[in-house]
Amino acid sequence: MIYEDVSEFAFEIKPNNSLIGLDLGTKTIGVAISDTIPSVATPIKTIKRKKFSVDADDLLKIISTKNCCGVILGLPKNMNGSEGPRAQSTRAFARNFSAKTNLPITFWDERLSTVAAEKALLEADTTRKRRAEVIDHVAAAYILQGFLDRLKVLKS
């Protein structure tokens, strides 16, 4: 089930389970996982995209292994808040992925997540090569952490 409203999605989250956050790119998918509270996002890997069925199977394996109860997809909005082709592609991925899983899926505005990830990696004095390797899953962690921070507000 796909939820546009984050507060409706929050009711679907099962206790003592993780959430998975995804930063969908055209060539890669950045993956981050929350702890089971859930309150902290951790970047875990970047998947090189192949075709949808292979990518979905890779994600479903992670979801199963990490005991995830929900999926947060970064929604790439334009700076003015409108949605362009990349957002439409993300929504199409969500529709296709929801046919493969019963997990609730929602979106989180990912504007500037890659910029924030890049800044954090630069501040950590990460080499250019290493930044290129990890930027997508670090961006996924920023997306997921933004959602988790909002979730804390909703629950209080």
Image (cartoon, helix red, strand yellow):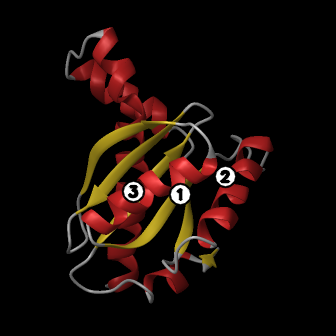
Question: Contact, CB < 8 Å: mark 1 with mark 3?
Answer: no
> Which disc is residue 155 wearing?
none
Q: Percent x, y for residue 72?
A: 48, 63
Q: How many marks?
A: 3
The first of marks 1 and 3 along the sequence is 1
- The residue sitting at 63% across, 34% down in the picture is 26
Q: Quadrant of the N terminus?
A: bottom right
Residue 149 vertical position relative to residue 119 in the rendered view, above or below: below
Q: Which residue is mark 3?
A: 144
- The residue sitting at 41% across, 39% down in the picture is 139
- The residue sitting at 24% across, 67% down in the picture is 39
Question: Contact, CB < 8 Å: mark 1 with mark 2?
Answer: yes
Query: Which element carries disc 1, helix, strand or loop?
Result: strand
* Any part of residue 81 in sight: no
Query: Which element carries disc 3, helix, strand or loop?
Result: helix
Residue at the farthest bottom position: 11
Image-based side of 83 in relation to 49, left or right: right
* Closer mark to the observer between disc 2 and disc 3: 2
Kind of residue at disc 2? Thr
